[in-house]
Image: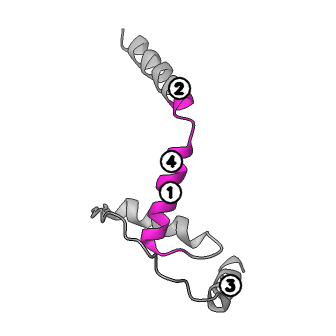
Amino acid sequence: MKTAVAVEKFMNARPRRRATTTGTLVGTRFQAALLEAIDSWRKEQLDLPTRPEAVRRLVELGMTHDTALSAKTSGRRAKQHSDEKT
């Protein structure tokens, strides 16, 4: 049902204009598992973004994530791991 709604919205959407400025092209290779995960994520979105748009959105999401919290958690995990070895 979610897919049908997304397809209907996509078909009724006005065509998007191309960007008036160009950004820097970044060529990237993805392993099959990561590409499948990206495709799976983009299919869950209501507007069904293209692969490049999905990658841009995921990068933006990752960059807005609280990195201080992640670093603290990673440090705690590393300490636990080193304690287990000794």
In the rendered structure, find residue 9 and report the number of the disc placed on it: 3
Name the secondary structure under disc 1. helix
Q: CA distance from mark 3 to mark 2?
A: 40 Å
The percent coordinates of residue 23 (x first, y second) are 36, 65
Residue in view at x 44 percent, y 15 percent: 79
CB-based contact (under 8 Å), mark 4 and mark 1: yes
Mark 2 or mark 1: which comes first in sequence? 1
Q: Does the magenta segment cover residue 56?
A: yes
Residue holding disc 1: 58
Instruction: Give the magenta part as a residue range.
Output: 49-70
Name the amino acid, label 4. Gly
Residue holding disc 4: 62
Left or right relative to 82: residue 41: right
Residue depth check, mark 3 versus mark 2: number of the one nearer the observer: 3
Crowdedness near tag 4: few (<14), some (14–19) or many (≥20) residues, C-alpha within 10 Å: few
Residue holding disc 2: 73
